[in-house]
Image: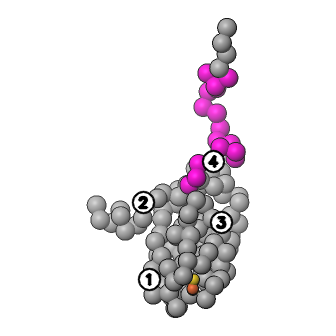
Amino acid sequence: MQTNPQANAEDPPIQSGVLKDNQFRVDAVQSGSALLVGDAAVFNVAGSFCATQGKCTHRGGPLNEGKLEGSTVTCPWHGAQFNVCTGAVLRGPATEPVKTYRVTVEGEIGQVEKKTDRDRDER
Ligand code: FES
């Protein structure tokens, strides 16, 4: 007799070990902090999530490691600042805005939607 352990599973809950590349546990991103999820940086801005591309548009600095104040992140490499919810450049040396992504939350699991806000606007 062949047994398949998954055959009897009824909608198993999402477990932390089986997150997809674009998913994260919401309790891993405290308010005012950031997390790299795939190639996106997810920021917790006072309890709501905003996501941008992970790399600064100046020279590719890791934005998830930058200081987050409100919705403003400061790139740790040369100090460019971006609004993490709109992607706008607030201070140079960067001149190009960062891409932003929508974040959805279901229970304990957040998910970065890889379509950019700009892609959605071009429907
Ligand atoms: S790499 Fe971000 S400011 Fe230079």
**Which residue extends farthest front?**
59
Give the residue number, with chain letter if any, for mark 3. 35
**Which residue extends farthest left?**
123
Q: Main secondary structure of the magenta part?
A: loop
User: Which tag, 3 or 2, sits closer to the chain's start?
Assistant: 3
Give the residue number, with chain letter if any, for mark 4. 19
Real-space CA distance between mark 3 and mark 1, rounded to the nearest whole angstrom? 22 Å
| Count of marks, rendered view | 4
Q: Tell which tag, 3 or 1, sits nearer the viewer.
A: 1
Secondary structure at badge 3 equals strand
Answer above or below: position of 15 versus 1: below
**Position of the C terminus by quadrant:** bottom left
User: Which tag, 3 or 1, sits closer to the chain's start?
Assistant: 3
Three-letter amino acid code at disc 3?
Answer: Leu
Proximity of marks 3 and 2: CB atoms separated by less than 8 Å: no
Real-space CA distance between mark 4 and mark 3, rounded to the nearest whole angstrom? 14 Å
Query: Which residue corresponds to the image point at 48% horizontal and 76% vertical from the top-left?
Result: 98
Report which quarter residue 4 is drawn in.
top right
Proximity of marks 4 and 3: CB atoms separated by less than 8 Å: no
> Looking at the image, which is closer to me, 36 or 12?
36
- Could you classify mark 4 by the number of other residues whose Cα lies within 10 Å: few (under 14), some (14-19), or many (20 or more)? some
Three-letter amino acid code at disc 2?
Answer: Lys
Q: Position of residue 91 (x, y in %)?
A: 52, 91
Horizontal placement of 96 versus 8: left or right?
A: left
User: Which tag, 2 or 1, sits closer to the chain's start?
Assistant: 1
Give the residue number, with chain letter if any, for mark 1. 96
Which residues make up the magenta segment? 5-22
The reply to whether residue 8 is visible in this rendering is no
Report which quarter residue 13 is drawn in.
top right
Give the residue number, with chain letter if any, for mark 2. 115
Q: Any atom of ligand 1 within 8 Å of the CB at mark 2?
A: no
